[in-house]
Amino acid sequence: MNPRNQGRLENANGIGEVGNASCGDIMKIYLFIKDSVIEDVAFETFGCGAAVASSSIATELIKGKTIDEAWELSNKAVMEALDGLPPQKIHCSVLAEEAIHAAINDYLKRSDLPPREE
Ligand code: FES
């Protein structure tokens, strides 16, 4: 009901956008990374309530973390932080994991570093 870190991040240096073809929902994660630490993070999600909640909690969980720690954030951890999601909404939490990976890889690409494998 109270999404955190919603909106754009004008100084983002890593941006990841992913979508789910079956429901059509889209999630975009903005990262500002300095010295391998996620100093700021924001999201824009066009999707269901579970996708918005997953984005919100995922951004809270990775704020202040290193890239390595953020990469390890699983959709399972996102679901646990939300006290669970119904089975038909599990893919919404997967979007958060995928969007964070896409944003980290965008940052690595911009920094002339090799992207990580899923
Ligand atoms: Fe597709 Fe939630 S229904 S992201």
Image (cartoon, grey):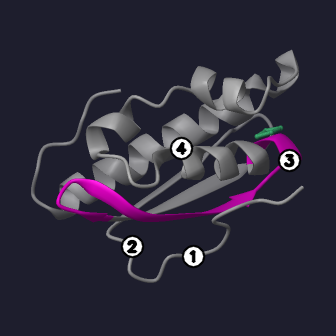
Res 96 → quadrant? top right
Q: Residues within 10 Å of mark 2 (few under 14, many from 20)?
A: some
Residue 48 is inside the magenta segment: yes
Seen as rendered, the residue at the extreme bottom is: 10
What's the residue type where badge 4 is placed?
Answer: Leu
Q: Position of residue 98 (x, y in %)?
A: 51, 38
What's the residue type where badge 2 is placed?
Answer: Ala
Most foreground residue, 26 or 64 = 64
Upstream in sequence: badge 2 or badge 4:
2
Quarter of the image with the C terminus is top left
Q: Is 91 placed above or below 36 here? A: above
Q: Is 50 placed above or below 43 here? A: above
Indicate which disc residue 12 carries: 2
Q: Which residue is mark 3?
A: 48
Q: Do tag 1 and tag 2 residues touch (Cβ < 8 Å)?
A: yes
Q: Which residue is mark 1?
A: 8
Which residues make up the magenta segment? Answer: 33-51
Q: CA distance from mark 2 to mark 4?
A: 18 Å
Check disc 2 and report its element: helix, strand or loop. loop
The residue that appears at 70% across and 26% down in the rendered structure is: 79
* CB of mark 2 near ligand 1 (< 8 Å): no
Upstream in sequence: badge 3 or badge 2:
2
Q: CA distance from mark 3 to mark 1?
A: 19 Å
Indicate which disc residue 61 carries: 4
